[in-house]
Image (cartoon, grey):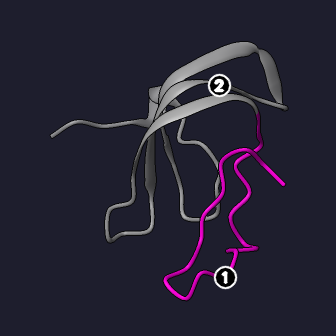
Amino acid sequence: MDRLFRIHADRALDTTFHSGVNWGNIFAYHPPPDGRVYVGGRYKRAVAPNDTLYLARFMPDGSRIRPSTMRTT
């Protein structure tokens, strides 16, 4: 299981959410109603072991939105 996972309101593990986070600590977690997840902490993903993340936004399936595709309005 990934170190960052999502649990449904009925306490069942969301098996569709795969973040790939395999190392670190999550200190802040915010799940807005659109299904995305905002996470703060110090952690790494298996696909990029040399990239330490501190703040990231994940899509509903757990894939990370790359900073170059983030938009502010």
Query: Which residue does the image show at 55% across and 79% down from the upper left?
Result: 8
Q: In front: 18, or 23?
A: 23
The Cα atoms of the two marked residues, 2 and 1, are separated by 24 Å
Query: Is disc 2 placed on a helix, strand or loop?
Result: strand
Query: Which residue does the image show at 39% across and 36% down from the upper left?
Result: 70
Rendering quarter of residue 72: top left
Q: Residue furthest bottom?
A: 10
Query: Which tag is nearer the camera, tag 2 or tag 1?
Result: 1
How crowded pointer 1 is (Cα within 10 Å; few <14, some 14-19, many 20+) is rated as: few
| Quarter that holds the C terminus | top left
How crowded pointer 2 is (Cα within 10 Å; few <14, some 14-19, many 20+) is rated as: many
Query: Which residue does the image show at 53% across and 56% down from the upper left?
Result: 59
Closer to the N terminus: mark 2 or mark 1? 1
Q: Is residue 12 magenta?
A: yes
Q: Which residue is mark 2?
A: 43
Q: Give the x, y percent position of residue 66.
A: 54, 33
